[in-house]
Each structure stands twice: as C-alpha cells, then as structure tokens.
Image (cartoon, helix red, strand yellow):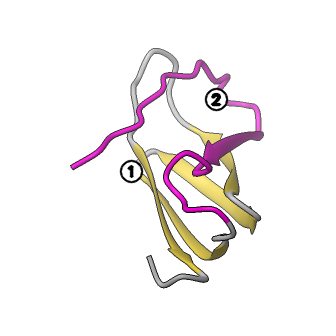
Amino acid sequence: MMANEKVYLKDPAAILDYAFDWSTWLTSGDSIVSATVVAETGLTVDSSAASGTAVTAWLSDGEPGDLYRVTCQVVTTAGR
C-alpha cells in the first residue's frame, strides 16, 4: 500500500481548500474522472472537485488541536 500523507493546520471557523495531487501516481495521459473525499467525524467535507490529475476538497469545522484523517479515492480514465 502506498501512502501520501500531509499535515495541515486549519482554523475551525475557516472553510479552506486542500489539494490531493495524484500526478505521480497516474500514467501519462491518464486523468481523474471521479473522486470521493471522506473526513473523520468532526470535520466536514463541504465539496470536492476533480480536474486533470488533482482533486480539491473544501473542508470546514473541526476542533482546535485535533487531528483528522481525510481520504481521497479516485477513478481514472484508464480504470485505475
């Protein structure tokens, strides 16, 4: 299993966009056709959008100092 983990700081009152860059995982010419972004309880995924080899998710809520796992699963034009 391959992992690409990052840690971001977020103000609970803010609604911010976070990018998932899949370019190093995809073959040449492959692109994302759909994506599912899920956050642990306490953090809200307001929306998400796929474009080319990246997915952007807008997140809100959360508690100061808490850590939340956010996962992004994609389907590509090559069926990956």
Q: Position of residue 67 (x, y in %)?
A: 39, 26
> Is residue 4 found left or right of 63 in the rendered image?
left
Front residue (pair 46, 24): 24
Which stretch is magenta? 1-28
At label 2, counting other C-alpha atoms closer than 10 Å, the crowd grade (few under 14, some 14-19, many 20 or more) is some
Mark 2 residue type: Pro
Q: Is residue 44 left or right of residue 55?
A: left
Asked if the residue under mark 2 is in contact with the one under mark 1, i.e. CB atoms within 8 Å, the reply is no
Q: Position of residue 68 (x, y in %)?
A: 40, 36
Q: Residue at x 63, y 45 (%)?
A: 21
- The amino acid beneath tag 1 is Thr
Q: Earlier in the sequence, mark 1 or mark 2?
A: 2
Tag 2 secondary structure: loop
Magenta stretch holds residue 10: yes
The residue depicted at 70 percent of the width and 63 percent of the height is 48
Give the CA distance from mark 1 to mark 2.
Answer: 14 Å
The residue pinned by badge 2 equals 12
Q: Which residue is at the front of the view, 10 or 35?
A: 35
Q: Is 38 positioned to the left or the right of 54 in the image?
A: left
For label 1, the SS is loop
| Residue located 38% across and 50% down the image | 41
Q: Residue at x 58, y 71 (%)?
A: 35
Question: In the depicted view, which residue is nearer to us: 80 or 19?
Answer: 80
The percent coordinates of residue 3 (x first, y second) are 33, 40
Q: Tell me: residue 18, above or below residue 5.
A: below
Q: Which quarter shows the C terminus?
A: bottom left
Q: Position of residue 64 (x, y in %)?
A: 52, 18
Whether 18 is among the magenta residues is yes
Residue placed farthest to the left in the image? 1
Instruction: Quickly name the residue at label 1.
Output: 41
Residue at far front of view: 28
Circle 1 crowding by C-alpha within 10 Å: few under 14, some 14–19, many from 20: few
